[in-house]
Image (spheres, grey):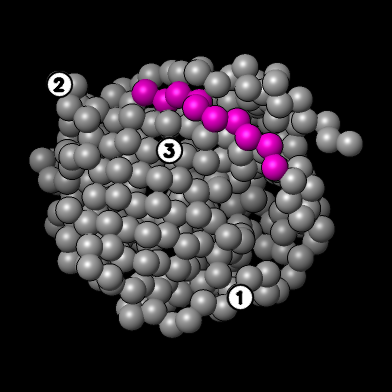
Amino acid sequence: MSRIDLDHLRRWVGKSRSDEDLIAARHARLMAATVDYFAPERIRDGDSLPALWHWLYFLEGSPAHELGRDGHPARGGFLPPVPLANRMWAGGRVRFVAPVPIGAMVRRKSTIVRVDHKEGRSGDLVFVTVLHELESSGGEALVREEHDIVYKEPSPPIAAGSAAHEVAPRGQFTKTFVPTSTMLFRYSALTFNGHRIHYDSDYCRAVEGYPNLVIHGPLLATLLAGFAEEAGGKRLRGFDYRALAPAFLGATVTLHGDVRDHRVDLRALDDGRACMQAQATFE
């Protein structure tokens, strides 16, 4: 019998909070160094922040005594107290209404809009959807984003490279890279992400059932969004993405893209195993 009290968790729907942050060029330049961004000269005040780099800002800094065992803030504050051990990015839908200017003060309002329960192959799944709305200090809408978070029980230990999904066909455009522990460390530091699956291999194996450090879902999504702009040659208007399986340190990640009119269909493969799919649309 499921132990999920969905009515209780849905009491968090409508809960919101607001924040303000400076879109600092220095922080963006550190991100450029982390991912070998192809145009570092664009990282200066007044220029547009690259797609999805707004995730570097509005960071939550809970003190150590308020963290859960996974390194995230303990549940029951802004996010509902879902009684499932593992928490990961499941995907999202992002609309870039206007460019986010580097060097500007930007406001973000976050609201919990949905809490859903599903039965998966591994048991209970709870999806929490948070709406993030970014606007300029003058009230101009910049970004509208629905972010899906999934909660689940720990998976049985799995081997890196095991085929959990069908291998996707080769795309019209491809790009390959091998994530390193340094890249994962830098991205965790830039986003103040304390989730131990990205830096504590013993915790990964013993507690959450992963064979190695997990590559950040938002990092993969950011790389796919940048790849879409390279392939399409235009600024993104929308970006929808969904995680299919974890990608692990030590794997070769290949980004695939197929340009179709005003969109790019995208996939990220971990040693040939599909781990994320996305669709980017242009202006």
The magenta segment: 109-118
Which percent across, then down, holds residue 105? 21, 27
Dominant secondary structure of the residues highlighted in magenta in the image: strand
Would you identify the image quadrant in which residue 81 lies? Answer: top right
Q: Which residue matches tag 2?
A: 138
Q: Earlier in the sequence, mark 1 or mark 3?
A: 3
241 is higher (above) or lower (below) than 254: above
Q: Residue at the spot x=30%, y=50% of the render? A: 238
Label 1 to label 2, Cα distance in Å?
47 Å
196 is higher (above) or lower (below) than 63: below
Q: Are marks 1 and 2 in contact (CB under 8 Å)?
A: no
Q: Which residue matches tag 1?
A: 166
Q: Residues within 10 Å of mark 2 (few under 14, many from 20)?
A: few
* Rendered image: mark on residue 146: 3
Q: Could you tell me the amino acid type at mark 2?
A: Gly
Closer-to-camera residue (211/239):
239
